[in-house]
Image (cartoon, rainbow, N blue to C red):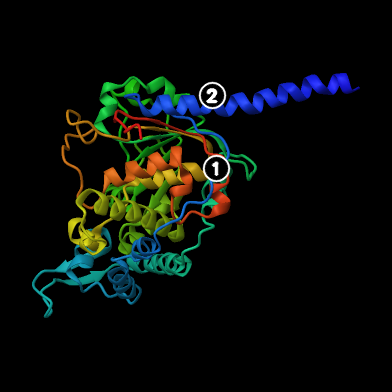
Amino acid sequence: MKSTVRPVFSVLLFISFVVPLICRLIFRRGLSSFELETYVIGSRPPAFVFNSTLLKFASVDLGERQSKRDIDQLLEANFGGPRAYRTYATWRRFNHYDKKARPSNSFPVTFRSPAFYRHWLDFRRSLSSWVRKKQLTTEIMPELVRLIKAPIDRQNGFVGSDKKYSACAVVGNSGILLNSAYGKLIDSHEIVIRLNNARTDNHESKVGSKTNISFINSNILHLCAGREGCFCHPYGPNVPTIMYICQPVHFMDYTICNKSHKSPLLITDPNFDALCSRIVKYYSVKRFMEVTGKSMEEWSSAHEGPLFHYSSGMQAVMLAIGICDKVSIFGFGKSPSAKHHYHTNQKNELGLHDYEAEYDFYYDLIARPQRIPFLSDKFKKHHFCIRWTSQRIWPTA
């Protein structure tokens, strides 16, 4: 009996020694290559000690006060502010304007149709529910399977399960994809997540053609809402859409367009939004101080203050690690010779995003998740398997 057990024990001991060594070698090689394709699977180092002052600063949402004012006005049906009025006024199908009759605020008098009031009740209910949920919890990541995957599974006729998807590809919109040929590799994943309705036509060999989840910001839906039937389905009407809210008034777009969607139109949990916001602000402030040598108090003026926000791509990556066992990231990164988006002629980045800080986050997500703030320790203890295919040269240190 002992002679049978010894060889098995020796094999197991050999595997436990060799596998971590191979992972370490692959990781080091990936850091020094032009294309970073890194897999990290294994136990985590000891907890990282964070700068408490930086954590506190990153926890403050500079736009929260204005957002609360906007929400209070909307719930009271007060559309008198110019910003809210301009957004709301696009709903011409529900309103008629008397240009001759102008009150003191100089806006034309609005006569609302009966259809408006039917949608108004749904709008108020949706916005109120969203506001009530808005309280930061560090345990939101494990909830994403229930909040996002379960409704999609039900739509597809599957029994709800607490298991994650096996392998997901998050396809960014960077122009660096035009110099690639990842189409077949992207389509080989169980789930492909695309951003902000970026079209794949004529780019299939580079970005693939398969789409299982459309991830957008509410500004995209607002543009779609002006179309007949709220058409917002470049990947087909059966592809589910997940959306985060940029402005509270966009709940009106959601209220109306949700009725025309065959597939689920899901809004991200506000706690998930808050988590993403804090993480990105932390990395942006940290990078700002390291690069410029200035204080964190000076960060706001350099990054548009209350308008500063995470990108759609960053939140899509966060979503993927919550609902997928393995995540591959494509089209995240940039090159001086590449367009900002592969499918548009946009050259410049948006000032309200800090892409370089988000790249630092992706690097930590792959190599050292213990350095990521605000994520619960319970979630960090899970094994990550992340691959980032990017045309960006990383430092070897």
Mark closest to the chain's N terminus, 1 or 2 = 2
> Which residue type does callout 2 highlight?
Ile
The residue identified by callout 2 is 22
Is residue 146 shown to the viewer in this render?
A: no
Crowding near the residue tagged with mark 1, few <14, some 14–19, many ≥20 C-alpha atoms within 10 Å: some
Crowding near the residue tagged with mark 2, few <14, some 14–19, many ≥20 C-alpha atoms within 10 Å: few
> Which residue type does callout 1 highlight?
Arg
The residue identified by callout 1 is 44
Is 284 left, or right, of 380 in this rendering?
left
Residue shown at the point (44%, 29%) measured from the top left: 38
Place of residue 109 in the rendered image (x, y in percent of width and height, measured from the top left)? 17, 73
Place of residue 229 in the rendered image (x, y in percent of width and height, measured from the top left)? 34, 47
Q: Secondary structure at mark 2?
A: helix
Q: Secondary structure at mark 1?
A: loop
Look at the image and tell me in which quarter the N terminus lies.
top right
The total number of labels drawn is: 2
Is 87 left, or right, of 207 in this rendering?
left
Nearer-the-camera pick, 342 or 94: 342
Q: Is residue 339 above or below residue 307?
A: above
As drawn, the residue found furthest toward the right would be 1
Is 28 left, or right, of 219 in this rendering?
right
Place of residue 190 in the rendered image (x, y in percent of width and height, measured from the top left)? 52, 30
Place of residue 328 in the rendered image (x, y in percent of width and height, measured from the top left)? 44, 32
